């Protein structure tokens, strides 16, 4: 049996996109940097965890895009532990209330919102990242690995999004070139490949992001 039908995309450009992925460490931040640079939009990571071990995604995107401060909104919540937001918050005595989170005004459109981990990451015991995506009402860009294992992970993620009537703008593959996988995902996943990010020989630099941003379709052309 095939996946349940996708939801239609908005007719006019929405306020922004939600960048999610099939996993943590899959390349959402690198991809968000490429999109923010390409569209000169506003980047927002509402739930940041793991600050005990990393600088956080907002400074990373700022460094990789070289855009001024006005293109970045601070996280709504930032926690030290490298865990899902629900667990990281509890360690600091915070119970999240994601149902109260509203989409902020973006000083520069569009708004590029980055999740934490994948779709089923808990924000509370009763709310997952995918529930927040549904509530915020932005279409999704799904970041996936390009190589072996992606078919299962990507189709599972798409099925979960379609079941909740969340529109999907497309997917972005990250890793070694694998056109066969992208074609299979487009056909069975009923969505489109928006871009491929190759494995870089060294940690991503602003120059790499600029080069890749130049290949991204304009924001207006997508709607
Ligand atoms: N194409 C690539 N080439 C080289 N390094 C990459 C590539 N994609 C991602 N990386 C590196 O892999 C690591 C994880 O990527 P990234 O931070 O973008 O993942 P993420 O999906 O945003 O994770 P999180 O769930 O923590 O937000 C980073 O150190 C990043 O620089
Ligand atoms: C700390 C890390 N870099 C992420 N931001 C949080 C990822 C949570 C993943 C939870 C899970 O799927 O098991
Ligand atoms: Mg990230």
Image (spheres, helix red, strand yellow):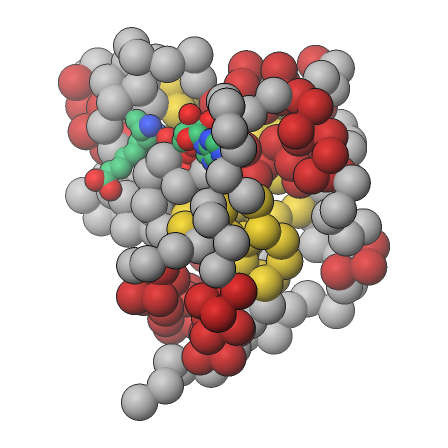
Residue at 39% x, 55% y is: 147
Is 159 positioned to the left or the right of 106 in the image? left
Where is 90 relative to 219, above or below? above
Residue at 33% x, 45% y is: 23
Residue at 25% x, 33% y is: 84
Residue 179, visible in the rendered structure: yes
- Hey, which residue is sitting farthest bottom in the picture? 1
Q: How many marks?
A: 0
The answer to which image quadrant residue 198 occupies is: top right
Observer-nearest residue: 194 or 178?
A: 178
Residue at 21% x, 14% y is: 92
Is 218 positioned to the left or the right of 164 in the image? right
Where is residue 170 shown, x and y percent of the image? 57, 62
- Image quadrant in which the C terminus is located: bottom right
Where is residue 203 shown, x and y percent of the image? 50, 22
Where is residue 2 shown, x and y percent of the image? 36, 86
Where is 42 relative to 151, above or below? above
Is 58 positioned to the left or the right of 155 in the image? right
Where is residue 104 shown, x and y percent of the image? 61, 34
Where is 70 relative to 124, above or below? above
Residue 100, visible in the rendered structure: no
Observer-nearest residue: 21 or 182?
A: 182
- Image quadrant in which the N terminus is located: bottom left
């Amino acid at each position: 049996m095939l996946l349940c039908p996708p939801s239609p995309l908005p007719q006019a450009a929405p306020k922004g996109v939600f960048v999610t992925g099939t996993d943590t460490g899959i390349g959402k931040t690198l991809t968000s940097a490429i999109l923010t640079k390409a569209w000169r939009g506003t980047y927002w990571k509402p739930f940041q965890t793991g600050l005990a071990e990393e600088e956080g995604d907002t400074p990373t995107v700022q460094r990789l895009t070289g855009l001024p401060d006005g293109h970045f909104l601070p996280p709504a919540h930032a926690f030290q532990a490298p865990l899902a937001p629900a667990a990281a918050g509890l360690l600091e005595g915070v119970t999240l209330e994601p149902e109260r989170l509203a989409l902020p005004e973006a000083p520069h459109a569009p708004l590029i919102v980055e999740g934490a981990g994948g779709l089923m990451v808990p924000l509370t015991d009763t709310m997952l990242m995918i529930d927040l995506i549904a509530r915020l009402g932005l279409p999704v860009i799904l970041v996936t690995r390009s190589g072996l294992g992606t078919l299962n992970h990507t189709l599972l993620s798409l099925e979960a999004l379609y079941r909740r009537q969340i529109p999907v703008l497309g997917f972005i593959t990250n890793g070694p070139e694998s056109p066969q996988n992208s074609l299979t995902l487009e056909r069975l996943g009923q969505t489109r490949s928006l871009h491929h990010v190759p494995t870089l020989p060294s940690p991503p630099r602003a120059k790499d992001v600029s080069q890749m941003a130049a290949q991204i379709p304009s924001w207006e052309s997508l709607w």
